[in-house]
Image (spheres, rainbow, N blue to C red):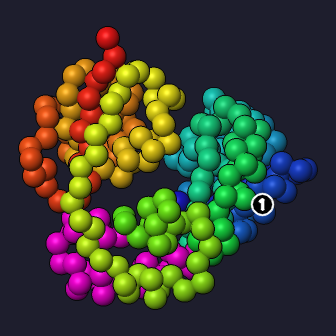
Amino acid sequence: MRLEGRSVILTGNGPAAEAKARLLERAGARIVGEDAAEAMLAIIADGDEAAVARLKARGLLVNVVDRPDLCDFTLPAIIDRDPVLVAIGTGGTSAGLAAALRQRLEPLLPASLGKLAQALHAARGSLRARFPDVDVRRRAIGALIAPGGPLDPLAPHDDPAATIAQAEAAPGRIERLDIASADPEVLTLRAARLLGLADRLYIEGEVAAAILDRARADAIRIKGAPPRVPGPGLSLHLVWTAE
């Protein structure tokens, strides 16, 4: 939710309230008291259930620190690479786990990630002109930012705009993956990466739904073996080999 210039009620004192105040200020929100009529959100840092009831009766969405059962919304742990935000949420069940995951993931995301996002945004017009077909354009961008690609998001880049200007349409190809287990945790790194990139899946046998869930939601799913010419982009031939 964009909070720039918006009023958010914050009640309570102490470390929890101070931490929430810092988050709200970073988001550009105006911190106000419970009586502010213009507010749409409220954060209760002192567990005051009477205040929760009053604010919910006014139609406000309320977050109550350490009380997920009373929350209408939760605040995730955030990795900020402006304008890129990575949010890690647990639905309020464990803020400590979300924070631990943030600390593990933070070093993986280079400081230049925001610069890459801005360069891709600035190039939208030129990319649309070069690749009028939306699927061709998506594949060209996907090839740029794929793992190990010219603009791998997890690698630092000094001049992403120059690399984007050299983008080319990705050629069509097909890869076969033998699937011997219904457990997605045993997928190889290569298989998991291909599933995340594929434009279409040709499925032979009873490949488990948990495996198919690792593919993009918009990837086309087709039962049976692929044709000799499967189409543009990346096609995966998934073959169930478990007995």
Q: How many marks?
A: 1
Q: Is residue 24 left or right of residue 207?
A: right
Q: Residue at horizontal 36%, vertical 64%?
A: 142
Closer to us: 108 or 188: 188
Q: Position of residue 39 (x, y in %)?
A: 59, 60
User: Farthest residue in the top direction?
Assistant: 243
Q: Is residue 215 above or below residue 135?
A: above
Specify few, some or many for label 1: CA neighbours under 10 Å numbering under 14, 14-19, or 20 or more: many
Quadrant for residue 22, please give it. Answer: bottom right
Residue behind mark 1: 21
Q: Position of residue 62 (x, y in %)?
A: 62, 45
Left or right of 37 in this view: 190: left
Say which amino acid is labelled 1: Ala
| Residue drawn at x 83%, y 48% as measured from the top left | 16
Q: Nearer the viewer, residue 42 or 116?
A: 116
Residue at the image position 41 percent from the left and 70 percent from the top:
144
Residue 213 in the image, given as x and y percentages of width and height: 37, 35
The correct choice, above or below, for 106 with respect to 123 in the image is above
Q: Which quadrant holds residue 38?
A: bottom right
Q: Splitting the image into 4 quarters, where does residue 226 fall?
A: top left
- Provide residue 237's location: percent of width, then percent of height: 24, 39
| Stretch in magenta | 114-141
> In the rendered view, would you say 66 is above or below 112?
above
Q: Identify the residue at image location x=30%, y=77%.
A: 168
Residue situated in front as seen by the camera: 124 or 52: 124
Residue 136 highlighted magenta (yes or no): yes
**Circle 1 — which element?**
helix
Q: Quadrant of the C terminus?
A: top left
Is residue 171 covered in magenta?
A: no
Left or right: where does residue 128 sit relative to residue 28?
left
